[in-house]
Structure formats: C-alpha cells, structure tokens
Image (cartoon, rainbow, N blue to C red):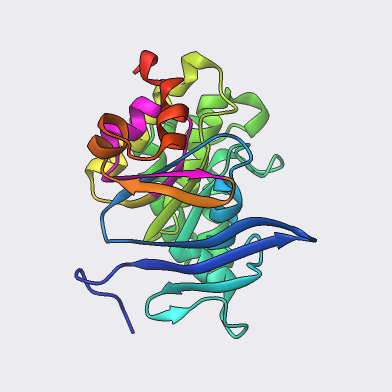
Amino acid sequence: MNTTKNTPILSVRHLVKCFGQREILKDIDFSIDHGNVISIIGASGSGKSTMLRCINLLETPTSGEIIFEGKNILDISNNIPLYRTKVGMVFQSFNLFSNMSVLQNCMVSPVTVLKHPKKEARQTAMQYLEKVGMAQYINARPDQLSGGQKQRVAIARALAIKPQILLFDEPTSALDPQMVGEVLSVMSDLANEGLTMIIVTHEMAFARDVSNRVIYMADGVIVEDGTPQDIFGNPQNKKTQEFLARFTKNI
C-alpha cells in the first residue's frame, strides 16, 4: 500500500530504545507528511540521533512501530537495504567510501542495491552532483575534499537513490564554521523543492527558517512539538524555554 498525499509518509508509534538497562528513547510518537521538513532539536544525549538511527534501522528499536507505506518496517520480513533506498540518511561524519571517487560513491547504491544500469546510475549521480555544486570533483577521492565538500557529496549520494524521505544526523556539526553555510544552502534548496526531511540539528536559525515543524527532545522524550513560530516564539514547556534561551541571542 502506498501512502497518499493525505496520509503521513512515515509514523513513529510508541518507540522505545534501551541499551542494557538504560532507556534512551521513551514512548516516542510523531508523524511526518509528504513534503514537510521536521527539525529535531535538543541537548546532546537527549536521544535525537538514536531516534534517527532507529528510523533508518541502524539501531533496532526495543519496542514500538515505524510505519512506512502502510507497513511496520520492524517486521523481520522487511527488506532493510531496499527500505534504506526509500528512507535515506546523511551522517555527521560523511561516511563516504575512501577508496572510491566522488562519482563512484554516488553510483554504488543505485548499481548494487537498486540494480540500475551503470550508464543510468552515472547520469543520475551527475545530476545530483551538479545540484550540490560538486560535478567538477567527480574523480576526486574523499581525502582530497574539504569537510563541506564531503558533506555535499554525501547529500548527492543520498539523493542518487531518489529517496522519499531524507534523514540528516547533525550534518554540519563536524564542519568548520565557514563550511556550514554551503551545506545548509543545499539543504534549504532541497526543502524548497519539497523533499521530505527529518533533520537533527544544532543550527537554530536553520530550524526556525526552513522547517514546517520543530520537535524539542530531552531525556529521551518529545517535550514539545509545534511550528517554528510556536517553538521559538512562544515555547510552552520550561525545559524548552531554558534550552532555547542559550540560542536565541544568536538567531
């Protein structure tokens, strides 16, 4: 069953994640609609990245459901590599293959997972490398690129599988300040084009200006969920107010 424009593209229901006796995520519940951008904010250790890794099945949830295309993807019969082509991920540390060129990095999943012909995969890779301003670097290896360039290649690689949702796990936190802007600019363009995105970020101005919704997490729970105007302009919870007080001077 495919989702329609009127149904959430992805729903997280009562998600719990434990590491041993430690409960990292506690009854997480939210949905995202087609074309929306949700920014997840909160202090380090609040469970934001763990939640994203559970959605992408890089971590196995302890309990709960993740509903995508009408199915609970935690069903053990689910094809995880295929699911990850529909729900892609961009990592904090780029995760590029160091032994491959920029172009090869962007072709590998379409060829190996989606079984696309190499010619088609190359055309698609070039299209997205052009979009992120990295087409002139197709023969470079990752160690020849700056952090900002690596992250733009990582975004192109994620786009090359044409995902329905793209997850970003603190995509600018490993970058020098002068490189942050070039990555956020690419992400803003994607949001304006209607790509569905869930973004864990410490970039408060970006979260305020680009998101449809902002979720504030603390201690493994969703404390507050609302529009950027609500969360940044009139937060209701004391924890949200205290967290944002540290950032609002800078945005």
**Residue lying furthest left:** 6
Quadrant position of residue 129: top left
Residue 177 spot, x, y in % from top left: 50, 15
Q: Is residue 128 above or below residue 74?
A: above
Residue at the spot 60% in from the left edge and 57% down from the top edge: 25
Marker count (numbered): 0
Magenta stretch? 198-218
**Residue lying furthest front:** 238
Residue 22 spot, x, y in % from top left: 74, 56
* Quadrant into which the N terminus falls: bottom left
* Quadrant into which the C terminus falls: top left
Residue at the spot 40% in from the left edge and 24% down from the top edge: 182
Quadrant position of residue 212: top left
Quadrant position of residue 71: bottom left
Position of 125 compared to 115: left or right?
Answer: left
Q: Is residue 179 above or below residue 199?
A: above
Say whether residue 115 is visible: no
Residue 208 spot, x, y in % from top left: 30, 32
> Quick check: is 200 in the magenta stretch?
yes
Looking at the picture, tell me which residue is in the foreground, 239 or 127.
239
Residue at the spot 64% in from the left edge and 43% down from the top edge: 95
Residue 245 spot, x, y in % from top left: 42, 22
Residue at the spot 63% in from the left edge and 37% down from the top edge: 93
Looking at the picture, tell me which residue is in the foreground, 250 or 172.
250
Say whether residue 163 is visible: yes
> Quick check: is 21 in the magenta stretch?
no
